[in-house]
Amino acid sequence: MVKEIRALEKQIETIKRQLVAIGDLRPGSLSKQYNVCGNPNCRCKEDPPRKHGPYYQLSFTRKGRSQTQFVKKAHIAMVKKQMKNYSRLRSLVDRWIELYDTSMSEEGRERNAIVIWPRSPPRTWHCPVHQNTVI
């Protein structure tokens, strides 16, 4: 069991090194927009319409608020790379948490040290580690 825990810890260390090397981050999704203007004689009013654009728009949520930013065509590649880095960050952190939970459950089985609380803790509870009752 100690070997499994060490293997999990080694994987976590690998993830930490990968996190340091990620680079610039940007959450959100990128969309391409075409617009129609208000000029009645414009090409965008023809049949078939030739709309203005493309305009690139980044949509994301930060601190619980939705936000939108226009992105210049020259910056599209950089923004896509930052979005890919952000996605990689999220997947690495999720994997780190999974590995940590697995290592803790392995240690818990070994030492019987982890106590999983029910939804609401009881008024009195017997601690198997310390062999006492907590009120």
Image (spheres, helix red, strand yellow):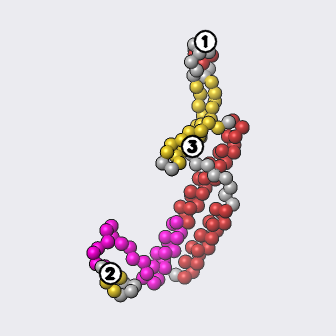
| Horizontal side, residue 129 vs residue 43: left or right | left
Find disc 1 in the rendering and name its residue: 41
- Above or below, 37 relative to 120: above
Q: For residue 116: magenta?
A: yes
Find disc 2 in the rendering and name its residue: 134
Find disc 3 in the rendering and name its residue: 29
- Would you say residue 107 is visible in this rendering? yes
Q: Residues within 10 Å of mark 3 (few under 14, many from 20)?
A: few
Q: For residue 115: magenta?
A: yes
Place of residue 107 in the rendered image (x, y in percent of width and height, measured from the top left):
49, 79
Q: Residue at x 57, y 43 (%)?
A: 29
- Above or below, 129 relative to 11: below
Quadrant where the C terminus is found in the figure:
bottom left
Q: Residues within 10 Å of mark 2 (few under 14, many from 20)?
A: few
Dot 2 falls on a residue whose secondary structure is: strand
Magenta span of residues: 97-125
Distance from Cα at disc 3 to Cα at disc 2: 49 Å
Q: Residue at x 29, y 73 (%)?
A: 122
Q: Are marks 2 and 1 in contact (CB under 8 Å)?
A: no
Q: Residue at x 60, y 57 (%)?
A: 89
Place of residue 115 in the rendered image (x, y in percent of width and height, measured from the top left):
39, 77
| Marked residue nearer the N-terminal end (1 or 3) | 3
Q: Nearer the viewer, mark 3 or mark 2?
A: 2
